[in-house]
Image (cartoon, helix red, strand yellow):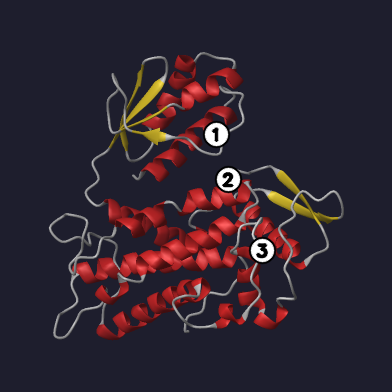
Amino acid sequence: MTPVELSRTVLRAVRRAVDDGELSVTVPERAVVGEPGPGGCGDFATTIALQLARPAGQTPRRVAEILRPRLADTAGIRDVVVTGPGFLNITLAAQADPVGALVREILEEGVRYGHGDGLAGQVVAVRVPYEVRAEVVADAVVRLVAAQGGRATVEHGEPADLRPVPAPEDPAPLGPDAARWALLHPAPHDRPRISADHLVQREGNPLFRVRYAHALVRSLGRNAGRLGFTAVPGPVEAAGDGVPDGGHDLRPLLVSLADHPRILAAAATHRAPDRVARHLVTVADAVLPFLPRVLPRGDEKPSAAHRARLALAEAAGTVLAGGLSLLGIDAPEHL
């Protein structure tokens, strides 16, 4: 279980306690987990009980005791201990293949990986001016909020509460996908570039890198099928050091994949689809150097490592496809 996954697990425990009537608080957007401090124990610790104590009207220790059994019965957690004023110390169950577990989760959830219920039951009202960029951003916000279990409504007029810097010219000549990317990728306070650079198939074009990475992953899957093997999540490392054969460091890729749910939740909460666009560039830049090492080379026979690497590549492709879909942009099978 990664820190991001554990943070989501802590928030689910809070939500269960609220649903059961034992806590009366607003479920926070994020639960911070880190190394246990002095006097702590286990693999990770969280201060969520101290954070919720005042709004809950209870002591941190009591909040921690309410959350402890809900965390302890979660798959992947071996033990939970309350120390100090209300620190929750978490010991994870032994996990022989954390990479395989992450990949398996992504492939099982498909393009819905990272969707959640953090905004369940909430209606997010968005008011925008009559302007093309504001319209596109609002449409992406509606998609992101829905992916987190909420519902967004869009109205037009003043005063607007969502007002990105307007597009300097009509983006329609770029085509639907490049136009949306040009309007969504920059931060709201940045002036979008409406230029043919978004159409050029070269490394300097972030949209091209994202879509090319996705198309290349799909191509690898088709080629693997011709070689007679399919993706199977499992260990991909050589000598257990986190670096597969060929010397490519997987950590940036794994971190970006594990962070995807947090990015989607934050983008929905803060009405910031640009966070998703920039995250997709991070995923693409992390997976592209890895892809040449997925298939067997020369007379090499497909092995369990090749199947695991293909599964990891397909997990990255799934994240790219899901993120592009939330932005309203096509993820091509061929490019």
- Please name whichever residue, 75 or 2, is drawn nearer the observer in this view of the structure: 2
- Say which element carries label 2: loop
**Residue 319 seen in this snapshot:** no
Q: Could you classify mark 2 by the number of other residues whose Cα lies within 10 Å: few (under 14), some (14-19), or many (20 or more)?
A: some
The image quadrant of residue 131 is bottom right
Q: Mark 2 vs mark 1: which is more N-terminal? A: 1
The image quadrant of residue 300 is bottom left
Residue under numbered circle 1? 15
- Say which element carries label 1: helix
For the residue marked with disc 3, what is the amino acid? Arg
- Please name whichever residue, 33 or 57, is drawn nearer the observer in this view of the structure: 33
The percent coordinates of residue 110 (x first, y second) are: 46, 63
Alpha carbons under labels 1 and 3: distance apart: 39 Å
Residue name at image x 55 percent, y 34 percent:
15
Residue under numbered circle 2? 117
* In this view, 230 is above or below 136: below
- Say which element carries label 3: loop
- Please name whichever residue, 255 or 204, is drawn nearer the observer in this view of the structure: 204
* In this view, 167 is above or below 250: below
Camera-near label (1 vs 3) is 3
For the residue marked with disc 1, what is the amino acid? Arg
The percent coordinates of residue 285 (x first, y second) are: 40, 67
Residues under numbered marks 2 and 3 in contact, where contact means CB atoms less than 8 Å apart? no
**Going by the picture, which residue comes out furthest to the right?**
157
Q: Could you classify mark 3 by the number of other residues whose Cα lies within 10 Å: few (under 14), some (14-19), or many (20 or more)?
A: some
130 left or right of 198?
right
Residue under numbered circle 3? 191
Residues under numbered marks 2 and 1 in contact, where contact means CB atoms less than 8 Å apart? yes
